Amino acid sequence: MEHQRCYIYSPAETQGRAPKRQKLTKANNPLTQLPERLQAYREIWSHQEERIQTTLEEGDGVTLEKIANFISSTAKPGPVQSPAIPTGLVLAGPSIASHGPFFERLGRKIKQDVDSAYLLLTSGECPNLKTLLKNLIKKATSRIEDDDDEDLERPSASSRNGPKLLDFDLGHLLEWQNKHKARKIVVALRDSEAFDANVLTELIDLLYSWLDRLPFVLLFGIATSTESFEDRLSGRVLRYLEGQKFDVTQSDEIIDKLFRATVASTDVSLRIGPNLARRVLGRQKDHLQNVQDFSDGLKYAYMSHFYANQLSIFLKVELALKDLTSDAFEATRNLPSFRRYIEGLVDSGRTEEARKLLTSDQDLFESITQHVESSREVLSALSGAATMLTHIRDTLHMSPPAPLSSVWIRAASGEMAGSPILRETMLAIKKVSSDKLAQLFASFDSLDTSYLLFDTEQYQRELEELLKENSNSTPLRTQHDVRNDSLRTTVVAQKVLLSKHKAALSEQDKAYSELVGRFHDELEDYFTTTFIDPRALFLSEILMFDLRSPHTEVFQPKPRFAIERSLASPYDYLGCDCCGPDGEQEAESALSSSQPATAILYQLYLESGMLINVSDLYSAFNAIAGEGNEDEDSTTRALFQRALAELKYLGLLKPSRKKTDHVSKMMWKGL
């Protein structure tokens, strides 16, 4: 056949094609609705930051007030009124990292309440007395009191009416004091135990000689004990000091209070998970022990959650359906907790409800709003139960002590139900005497008992009525108390048998046992109901952030590993093909002239021994980087010298004392 029929097919244009392609370009974009998430983060973190500041002020407030009162109550300078230098021994504890923030808060308190000059010195800037006095005078006279003062109160180099003063003469400080009339000149040595003992002795002698003209007050920051500090000074110098000791709240106590206020509180919108909380507290205990670092770690966790998790938009207050995109609902339907929830609906026969959640964004939005609020209440109840358990153990003085942080982490991990610590606490409740139970009920007034499932005031009233009827001063005891048990000895067939019998209980003890039994049962039901695994909650991924990888990489980085990898495999960081391996050649053994000079020299460095001949090293480097071309010898030599200097700066090698033309290898990869 010369001809064959053909047909032209013209499909009708569909309106859904273009929007579908546009949707695919926006899917899985971490920057979706970023401004809204940023606003939600700022609102939630502002409440957390307010709690942190309030906790810090309450933790150090009493000590700061005592030190400020001590400074303001010291006598004025004079030969009669001031026989010794007023001295404050500030026991700041072994956490050196927390000394700096504390003395900064102390300085603000002194300047605000006492209206005095506060001069903070550290051992690093005071190697000898002359340098110490220079820094002391500089910090005092460089304070800008008036905007019109152009010379910034610098010490004068000469005097018209007298001899020239040296820059470490306290006469500069006297001139400044006569002009500004500061009430006190507080000299604070933050790490006094790191100062040289001779420098401290000379400083105290000098300040004592000027005490009739300058109102000095000394503050020593001590990390160990006052006895060890006094042993470093002679008896003559100690007579120049009139000291008072101040105990600072230790870092671990403040961290526990911060954890209680920010993580284990019943009023928190976003919580960090148990794994991340355990790592943050472990890092705080083993490495940093700094309050500010704990706050920074918590803030970074919040930032990571709101930036990387698109579903954090559901934590925004007064959220409407029109404020959300379809991507948020698609991401919700891919959550593990959502899949478990749908499977539960299908297994229970609620297939129609499951179908609506899978197909309708409106129904899913209503379900998310409802479950976010209910899951938040469940987490608040869990935090309240952890607080209640810790409070009971502290009030009954049970050992070993269980801080709230460890109890909350175990509860958030789902490990508290049936745990030994819970069984031990409930057994102690069974055996508690009336005097201790009365103290426990009275201490509930300081707790938020709104999350409890029973009324503690009713039990307290019943106990008070029983105690009024008790004519004996002996506390009431339950039938489970070991003091109500008695041993009976029986001889049968020349064998001694021991048997345990309950002593006869009085009517009041029986009534008290019944009251304790009811309280024990209700408390046990409360703990059983509340201590659940929060990770099994619907939408727990929105309410809890428990990813350790970004947090660990930021706060526990591995710089040596990163440097070794970048030098051994530069193409992993540069992202170029020219520096990569050729064919099936191994990555670390691939040397090419396109690689950075430092990377080439480092790979040659790995193949060398402890002593490296620089001439041989340059020959190997020139064969790769210079490709054996002697015309570019000057450029290659410059690259070699710069790469060698960079390896020396990184601490990988140093000049050898044995051979002048060799360098010593300092580090081995992986060691």
Image: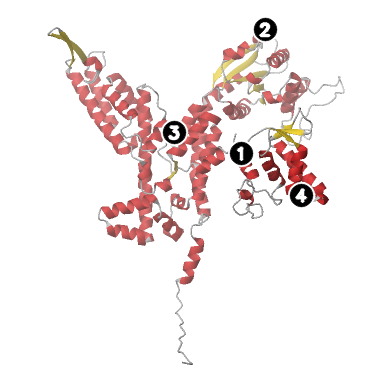
Q: Alpha carbon of mark 2 to alpha carbon of mark 1: how far?
A: 50 Å
Residue type (three-letter) at the residue carrying disc 2:
Arg
Q: Alpha carbon of mark 4 to alpha carbon of mark 1: how far?
A: 31 Å
Under tag 1, what secondary structure?
helix
Under tag 4, what secondary structure?
loop
The residue carrying mark 3 is 260
The residue carrying mark 4 is 626
Q: x%, y% of residue 161?
A: 87, 21
Mark 2 and mark 4 lie on one chain; the one further toward the N terminus is 2
Q: Which mark is residue 56?
A: none
Under tag 2, what secondary structure?
helix
- Which of the two residues, 645 or 71, is positioned nearer the viewer here? 645
Mark 3 and mark 2 lie on one chain; the one further toward the N terminus is 2
The residue carrying mark 2 is 236
Colour scheme in use = secondary structure
Residue type (three-letter) at the residue carrying disc 3:
Arg
Q: Label 4: few (<14), some or many (≥20) within 10 Å?
A: many
Q: Alpha carbon of mark 1 to alpha carbon of mark 3: how far?
A: 33 Å
Name the quadrant containing residue 227.
top right
